[in-house]
């Protein structure tokens, strides 16, 4: 038998190393590497299994029955993120910070799917069944035929699932599950990996859809959801700021639909309610035009979303000025600052720069470049962007503005929300939307000169 050696795994990304180190080479995180007992190595390659490994030609599949249809929960924001409903026998990971609302979301989803006729079981490893029932009462879901189980031993869970034969099982959370074939504590990289592997392969074998909840962990001994991302069909993250009531469910991987799709929810006293018009919500707190505030017309998945970007630029008391970003990429901010300095002669040396995406949204589109640049200059020059103006466009290192996709959708959404003009790059597909004046520029310096007279 092969000798099992001690290995070291990163609790953030699951990378495996033979030596301990302070920083993970896989994801760059510090203090996330812990000692790990390996899952026992299988039979050596010399011994082959019996006749279990079968293959089938692609053309034979033609005669198979058409796959069962997807089930819609009726909650649009959830169904869209899933790629158009729940695919039978699929494995879905829902990650998110502790306390963000994952259990609430999934209990509500379980109830909706159960009401649509799916046999659904909700396995909680964190709360007793009575506590889950209390939550269900508060969410007014007690009439839904969802089965509850409070269990953490994987063997017992698999037995329950085998007996009950549900069509949808929800496992909350993977960090509390433990398999007795693995020596380490629940929540360790090898336990989380083993439990997720057993659960997903069991679900596929039994033709059951499975949702696995994973807490995002900052550091330490507990493995995060990234460790199991590669084992599942769909990876969703539930994001939001604790202080805000908005929550965004974002698909980062989906074998059955578009990644990058988002669903927006609002946390209320009675659980999560869907937000069908997120732009209106994200802009609700916006007042009169102010320096540093800009509205970006973005696209999230298949849907246009308008968000407010806020910048603050102030003289820095430090030798190394601060660059702080919330909701956007910090290296992208560094790039925009460099382009502004090199191509437009607007330096930010000696100035602290803060950038915030309002409402707790996270933006990853390069199309936000121009809006970010506009917010930065507006804050620096203390001069507001004209009212009712939406901005979008990508900036290249040369300072040229590049057209972005779905111009028409962006303009339409802006027009729907009462905006009357847009600042956009020249070129791209010509799009005309009634009531929207377009101010087009081919490079950043031209934009700065025209809008700020700099
Ligand atoms: P929860 O779903 O338990 O979070 P997670 O499973 O991601 O750890 O959500 C907990 C938070 O949600 C808690 O701070 C209270 C809030 N909440 C409401 O505001 N309204 C509600 O109806 C419920 C059930 C929770
Ligand atoms: Mg929970």
Image (cartoon, grey):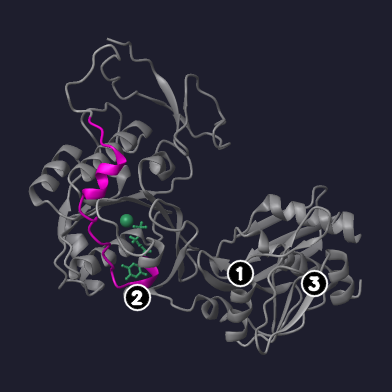
Secondary structure beneath label 3: helix
> Secondary structure of the magenta portion, mostly?
loop
Tell me where residue 105 sits by quadrant: bottom left
Which of 31 and 64 lies nearest the eye of the viewer?
A: 64
Figure quadrant of the C terminus:
bottom right
Query: Residue 406 — which label?
Result: 1
What residue does disc 3 label?
378
**CA gap, disc 1 to disc 2?**
37 Å
Q: Is residue 141 visible?
A: yes
The crowding category of the residue bearing disc 2, from other C-alpha atoms within 10 Å (few below 14, some 14 to 19, many at least 20), is: few
Q: Looking at the picture, how far across and down is residue 428, in whole percent?
A: 71, 68
Figure quadrant of the N terminus:
top left
Residue range of the region highlighted in magenta in the rendering: 54-78
* Residue 446 relative to residue 132: left or right: right
The crowding category of the residue bearing disc 3, from other C-alpha atoms within 10 Å (few below 14, some 14 to 19, many at least 20), is: many
What residue does disc 2 label?
269
């Amino acid at each position: 038998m092969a000798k099992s050696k001690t290995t070291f795994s990163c609790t953030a990304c699951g990378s495996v190393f033979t030596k301990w180190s302070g920083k993970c080479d896989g994801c760059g995180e510090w203090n996330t590497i812990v000692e790990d007992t390996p899952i026992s190595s299988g039979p050596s390659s010399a011994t082959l299994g019996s006749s279990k490994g079968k293959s089938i030609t692609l053309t034979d599949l033609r005669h198979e029955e058409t796959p069962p249809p997807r089930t819609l929960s009726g909650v649009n924001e959830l169904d869209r993120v899933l790629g158009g409903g729940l695919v039978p026998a699929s494995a879905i990971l829902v990650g998110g910070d502790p306390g963000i609302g994952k259990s609430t979301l999934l209990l509500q989803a379980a109830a909706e799917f159960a009401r649509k006729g799916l046999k659904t079981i909700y396995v909680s490893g964190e709360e007793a069944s009575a506590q889950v029932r209390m939550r269900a009462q508060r969410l007014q879901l007690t009439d839904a035929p969802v089965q509850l189980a409070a269990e953490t031993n994987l063997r017992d869970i698999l037995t329950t699932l085998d007996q009950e034969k549900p069509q949808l099982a929800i496992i909350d959370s993977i960090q509390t599950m433990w398999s007795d074939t693995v020596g380490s504590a629940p929540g360790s990289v090898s336990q989380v990996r083993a439990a997720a592997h057993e659960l997903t392969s069991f679900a596929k074998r039994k033709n059951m859809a499975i949702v696995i909840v994973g807490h995002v962990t900052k550091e330490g001994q507990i493995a995060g959801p990234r460790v199991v991302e590669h084992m599942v069909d769909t990876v969703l993250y539930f994001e939001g700021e604790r202080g805000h009531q908005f929550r965004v469910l974002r698909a980062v991987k989906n074998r059955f639909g578009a990644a990058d799709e988002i669903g927006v929810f609002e946390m209320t006293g009675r659980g999560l309610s869907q937000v069908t018009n997120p732009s209106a919500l994200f802009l609700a707190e916006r007042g009169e035009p102010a320096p540093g505030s800009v509205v970006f017309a973005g696209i999230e998945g298949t849907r246009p979303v308008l968000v407010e970007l806020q910048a603050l630029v102030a003289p820095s008391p430090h030798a190394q000025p601060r660059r702080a970003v919330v909701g956007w990429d910090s290296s992208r901010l560094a790039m925009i600052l460099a382009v502004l300095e090199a191509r437009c002669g607007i330096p930010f040396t000696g100035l602290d720069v803060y950038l915030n995406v309002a409402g707790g949204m996270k933006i990853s589109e390069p199309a936000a470049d121009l809006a970010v640049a506009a917010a930065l200059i507006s804050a620096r020059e203390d001069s507001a962007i004209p009212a009712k103006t939406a901005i979008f466009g990508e900036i290249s290192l040369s300072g040229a503005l590049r057209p972005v996709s779905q111009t028409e959708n962006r303009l339409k959404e802006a027009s729907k929300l009462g905006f009357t003009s847009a600042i956009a790059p020249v070129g791209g597909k010509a799009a005309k939307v009634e009531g929207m004046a377009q101010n087009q520029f081919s490079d950043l310096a031209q934009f700065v000169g025209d809008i700020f007279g700099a």
